[in-house]
Image (cartoon, rainbow, N blue to C red):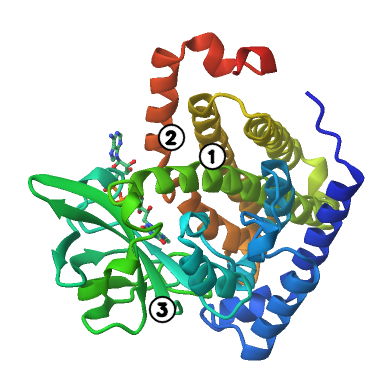
Amino acid sequence: MDFSLTPEQQDLRERARTFADALIPHEVAAEEAGGIVPTEVKAEIRRLARELRLIGGNHAPEHGGQGWKMMEHVIVHEELGRITNGLWWLMGGGYNVLALGTPEQIETYLKPTLAGERADAYAVTERDAGSDASGIKAIAERVDGGFRIRGEKWFVTSGDHADYLIVMANVIDGGSRLPTLFLIDLPCPGVEIIDDPLFTHVFPDGHPTYRLDCVVPETAVLGGPSQIGHGDAGQHAWFVEERIHIAARCVGAMQRLLDEAVGWATQREQFGQPIMEFQGVSFPLADSAADCVAARLLTYQCAQMFDDGAAPKLVHARASMAKLFASERAYVCADRAVQTWGGRAYMRRNAAERLLRELRVDRIWEGTSEIQRLIVANALVKRGVSATLAVDARELT
Ligand SMILES: Cc1cc2nc3c(=O)[nH]c(=O)nc-3n(C[C@H](O)[C@H](O)[C@H](O)COP(=O)(O)OP(=O)(O)OC[C@H]3O[C@@H](n4cnc5c(N)ncnc54)[C@H](O)[C@@H]3O)c2cc1C
């Protein structure tokens, strides 16, 4: 294993770091405004992300993306994880399933999304289908010239700002239900937000609930008619990728938490000495350092497996391990940082306080910790213990 970065990757890290450092000063204002970011700050974030070539890492350059390898995603997401209040999310970008689009969909959806002219939101989860996405009830029935889609979608991140939705629904085909992704332009008659609750984190976009009863043309099937029934495959690819991104952001968050906590503990004095000199304060931070490096190595190694073309099922399991470990440990690190800061970390202007709330969802979205454990346990049985634990490339094909 060699994790040394190429000069291009070092440059990418510098660019991502510049971006993160520029956003951090806006965090407290965003927190105090309930997540709302002034239009001019939003525009500046988008301009900077574009200038630093950080938008659309998951898409091909000919579509307006950056065509990054997974290691490059990890390098960037580590830096993004240092930022609170989801400010980085404002840079925009397109879900990776858009790359499965027909040439016309690439022109109509993907390219304008990466250019910042359109915005997507991904709607899979339902009231009765969360971890078990196979239980979705949204249906698409064939009607003259297209499909009638009916269903209810929960937690649609950015659904309050999107101008189109990517919706998973089952096409009814005789007795079969074929999971299929649809592109639905907004506004659309029969598609409405029925709830827009507040969440634990203070985020720039909401996660509203949508009710759908609408008719869409045949051309709304993502990837065209041949993709009817293949919606799960596209989603699966997104899950693996996003789980690695989450792990990397958690690593970045742990680094930020250590920067904040060590900075404070070496400067704050009680009983005539810096509190860092009390082992009750310094030892938990040493544990956080070990957690951070362990999560970083696991995430880098997973990215390397992905880039080296290791067996997809083993990459899937390793991505689950990375997300599970990094998200669980990052939450513990946030709690330790809060304790280090004492009462000041009960104030929302403190980054540790915000990270303690914000990191909680990383143990829930893109598959809960329990679902990651199921995937890993399944790999132990089906792929074998050695293959599931292997780090030697020869054992991973
Ligand atoms: C802020 C936020 C944003 C989100 N954004 C989106 C989005 O943009 N698009 C989208 O489609 N969805 C989104 N989601 C939904 C998210 O993916 C789901 O919340 C997640 O998959 C879990 O589903 P659930 O909430 O229904 O929990 P459930 O599936 O009901 O799980 C409840 C509990 O049961 C446990 N559990 C379930 N099954 C098992 C099992 N087999 N073994 C052991 N334990 C089990 C879970 O781990 C969990 O602890 C978002 C969620 C949040 C909170």
**Residue 392 appears anywhere in the view:** no
Q: Position of residue 151 (x, y in %)?
A: 19, 65
Tell me which amino acid carries mark 3.
Answer: Asp
Write down the quadrant of residue 147 in the picture.
Answer: bottom left
**Residue density around tag 1, few if under 14, some if 14–19, many if 20 or more, within 10 Å:** many
- Please give left or right for residue 73 compared with residue 134 in the image: right
Residue closer to the observer: 344 or 5: 5
| Pointer 1 residue | 323
The local secondary structure at tag 1 comes to helix
Which residue appears at 51% of the width and 41% of the height? 240
Q: Is residue 120 above or below residue 334?
A: below
The local secondary structure at tag 3 comes to loop
Tell me which amino acid carries mark 2.
Answer: Gln
Residue closer to the observer: 295 or 339: 295
Which residue appears at 45% of the width and 15% of the height? 383
Tell me which amino acid carries mark 1.
Answer: Lys
Measured in 3D between alpha carbons, the distance from the residue under mark 3 to the one under mark 1, in whole angstroms, is 27 Å
Write down the quadrant of residue 349 in the picture.
Answer: bottom right
| Pointer 3 residue | 160
Q: Position of residue 139 (x, y in %)?
A: 17, 59
- Please give left or right for residue 373 compared with residue 12 in the image: left
**Residue density around tag 2, few if under 14, some if 14–19, many if 20 or more, within 10 Å:** many
Q: Is residue 186 above or below residue 71?
A: below
**Residue 197 appears anywhere in the view:** yes
Assess whether mark 1 and mark 2 are in contact (beta carbons under 8 angstroms): yes
Q: Is mark 1 within 8 Å of ligand 1?
A: no
Q: Which mark is residue 372?
A: 2
The quarter of the image holding the N terminus is: top right
Q: Is residue 124 above or below residue 238?
A: below
